[in-house]
Image: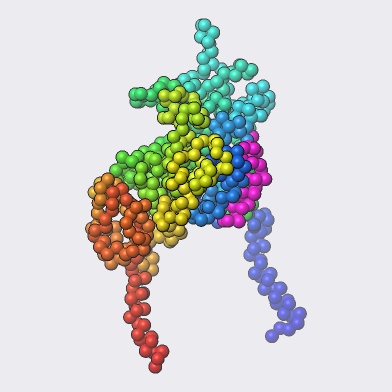
């Protein structure tokens, strides 16, 4: 054997030999061996939770939620089984549209706290294993943004940062806008600026002038905004109002919608928005942002950074965002196309239309509610658990809106107390059809002052009076509750069958819906099955004849909607006659094959093993 210096030489030779491939790779890549995107796909079966910061938790007692409040409640997400939180806008803003009108894209609004507060939030989130997603609002700024002031003054290079156009003048001297385009918030989408002597375009409120993405300067400015927040440790962005980014440059009038019965000519649905939405350049810009995020993650050697996109548009236009880099183009079909009157066939078609049309290897997502639409528990009375179960059992990403985990409902807000500009731009007779305030009311933590949201009894929006009985603390201590159903579902999502299993959706004779997830490996079949009764009366499901489970499978209750008279983990004895009370839903698990066979073999040979040991 080699001795002394010979041993050291041998060890060194082996180290060099082992290192040589990596040294060559380092030279080949120009020294960027460390550059790699880690944890790719972490988001694919994650539960994302949308926080509406104004309404989540108020730490300083001013009646408005803030960052310190969110930080103080981060353990709630761990307890609930949530993997990522997404914050609605927290940037500096005059709050005309409560944060969606941004005066500085790199500052935190004092209402919510400071940059230090945000850094503390992200640091604590990382300690708890939570990802943090920021809302990115690229379509417009506030009209008090520095860029807009300089654009009004025609200062270079800001002159074309916004969409400016000349209008026309009537014989009587009345100024007319460039065309007939209507704002999402009702009324003309153009406002005249006296100082510049031109009209500026705004898809939303007049205080939210649209940025001009035909300007390379604007494109680079917004990329720098993304880089700034990535450096602060965020894990991705939810991109707001994506379809509105670009409009045609020739200002063609938009046609009137096919059916305008009962629609006010000043309201957004009156026109068919074929020239102010879904333009080709929009998709190119999205692709550039995805490239930026990938390059950042690669250079920083960090976990994958993701893009989530909000697009209220048709299915074809929405699915295109997959092709240009959106990891999660929000699926709003259960919000926009499904109601409490929808049938099992409608639900099945909604699921199939998304899954069957998305690109190969894309990941589905299911959004049941958000800050722009009536709460799930209000849209589906006494069926909140059903919708949560559906989002959790279907394959892909589940998105939970602030309060859905406890079944919060809409809060009525009077015209006098209305805050939402979308409603304030109408009148007392029409505001309720436009307001988003009812689904933005403060989170209901417990039975103390303002539902535990704030020590202040005067909150920015009224707390729902039902907080006395509907709140997190009560549900955590109850034997059964919406929250405990939610926890069981998020736990189940960690199982291999929900992470990797196939799916099958069945309309059961128009009475019920089944969603099955199946994983077959090593001779073993595992299933998770969701059954939803759509009737206002009891119905029964034959799991065997419906080909939902096999005859040899052991089927057990896993969790049920509130009020279902069965304890979880109980085995279903008669699989041909599973009873579902009116509007009830249940999740069952089943197993067959190798696991059962193995158990039988073990039981059979135990006596032989015992005999062998004894003898």
Q: Is residue 123 magenta?
A: yes
Q: Is residue 448 magenta?
A: no
Would residue 71 be seen by someone viewing this image from the given angle? yes
Q: Which residues are magenta?
A: 104-129
Q: Quadrant of residue 493?
A: bottom left
Asked if 168 appears above or below 413 in the picture, the reply is: above
Q: Residue at x 37, y 52 (%)?
A: 562
Q: Position of residue 192 (x, y in %)?
A: 57, 18
Closer-to-camera residue (414/8): 414
Q: Residue furthest right?
A: 5
In this picture, residue 171 sits left or right of residue 9: left
Closer-to-camera residue (416/183): 416
Would residue 547 be seen by someone viewing this image from the given angle? no
Q: Quadrant of residue 606?
A: bottom left
Q: Residue at x 41, y 30 (%)?
A: 433
Q: Residue furthest bottom?
A: 615
Q: Quadrant of residue 571?
A: bottom left
């Amino acid at each position: 054997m080699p001795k002394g210096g010979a041993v050291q030489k041998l060890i060194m030779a082996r180290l060099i030999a082992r290192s040589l491939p990596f040294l060559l790779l380092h030279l080949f890549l120009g020294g960027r061996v460390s550059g790699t995107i880690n944890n790719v796909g972490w988001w694919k079966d994650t539960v994302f939770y949308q926080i509406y910061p104004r309404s989540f938790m108020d730490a300083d007692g001013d009646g408005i939620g803030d960052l310190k409040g969110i930080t103080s409640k981060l353990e709630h997400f761990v307890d609930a089984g949530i993997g990522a939180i997404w914050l609605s806008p927290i940037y500096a803003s005059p709050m005309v549209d409560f944060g969606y009108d941004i005066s500085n894209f790199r500052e935190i609004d004092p209402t919510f706290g400071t940059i230090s507060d945000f850094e503390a939030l992200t640091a604590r989130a990382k300690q708890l294993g939570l990802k943090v997603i920021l809302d990115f609002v690229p379509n417009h700024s506030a009209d008090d943004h520095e860029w807009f002031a300089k654009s009004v003054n025609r200062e270079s290079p800001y002159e074309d940062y916004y969409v400016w156009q000349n209008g026309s003048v009537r014989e009587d001297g009345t100024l007319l806008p460039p065309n007939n385009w209507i704002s999402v918030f009702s009324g003309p989408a153009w406002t005249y600026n006296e100082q510049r002597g031109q009209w500026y375009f705004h898809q939303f409120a007049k205080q939210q002038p649209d940025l001009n993405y035909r300007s390379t300067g604007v494109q680079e400015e917004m990329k720098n905004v993304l880089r700034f927040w990535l450096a602060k440790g965020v894990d991705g962005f939810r991109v707001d109002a994506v379809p509105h980014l670009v409009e045609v440059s020739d200002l063609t009038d938009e046609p009137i919608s096919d059916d305008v019965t009962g629609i006010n000519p000043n309201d957004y649905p009156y026109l068919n928005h074929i020239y102010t939405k879904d333009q080709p350049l929009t998709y190119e810009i999205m692709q550039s942002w995805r490239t930026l995020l990938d390059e950042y993650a690669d250079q920083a050697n960090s976990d994958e950074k993701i893009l989530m996109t909000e697009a209220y548009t048709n299915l074809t236009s929405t699915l295109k965002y997959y092709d240009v880099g959106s990891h999660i183009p929000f699926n709003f079909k259960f919000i926009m196309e499904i109601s409490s009157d929808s049938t099992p066939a409608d639900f099945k078609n909604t699921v199939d239309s998304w899954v069957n049309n998305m690109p190969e290897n894309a990941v589905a997502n299911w959004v049941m509610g958000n800050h722009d639409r009536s709460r799930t528990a209000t849209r589906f009375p006494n069926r909140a658990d059903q919708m949560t179960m559906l989002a959790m059992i279907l394959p892909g990403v589940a998105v939970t809106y602030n309060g859905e985990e406890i079944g919060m409902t809409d809060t009525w807000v009077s015209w006098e107390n209305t805050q939402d500009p979308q409603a304030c731009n109408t009148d007392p007779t029409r505001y309720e059809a436009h307001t988003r305030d009812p689904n933005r009311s403060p989170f209901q933590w417990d039975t103390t002052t303002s539902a535990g949201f704030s020590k202040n009894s005067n909150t920015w929006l009224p707390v729902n009076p039902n907080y006395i009985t509907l709140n997190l603390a009560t549900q955590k201590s109850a034997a059964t509750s919406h929250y405990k159903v939610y926890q069981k579902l998020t736990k189940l999502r960690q199982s291999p069958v929900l992470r990797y299993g196939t799916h099958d959706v069945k309309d059961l004779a128009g009475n019920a819906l089944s969603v099955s997830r199946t994983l077959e490996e090593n001779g073993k079949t595992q299933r998770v099955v969701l059954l939803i009764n759509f009737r206002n009366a009891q119905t029964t499901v034959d799991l065997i004849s419906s080909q939902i489970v096999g005859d040899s499978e052991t089927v057990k209750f896993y969790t049920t909607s509130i009020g279902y008279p069965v304890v979880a983990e109980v085995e279903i004895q008669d699989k041909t006659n599973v009873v579902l009370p009116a509007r009830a839903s249940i999740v069952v698990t089943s197993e067959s094959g190798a696991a059962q066979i193995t158990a039988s073999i073990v039981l059979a040979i135990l006596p032989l093993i015992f005999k062998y040991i004894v003898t």
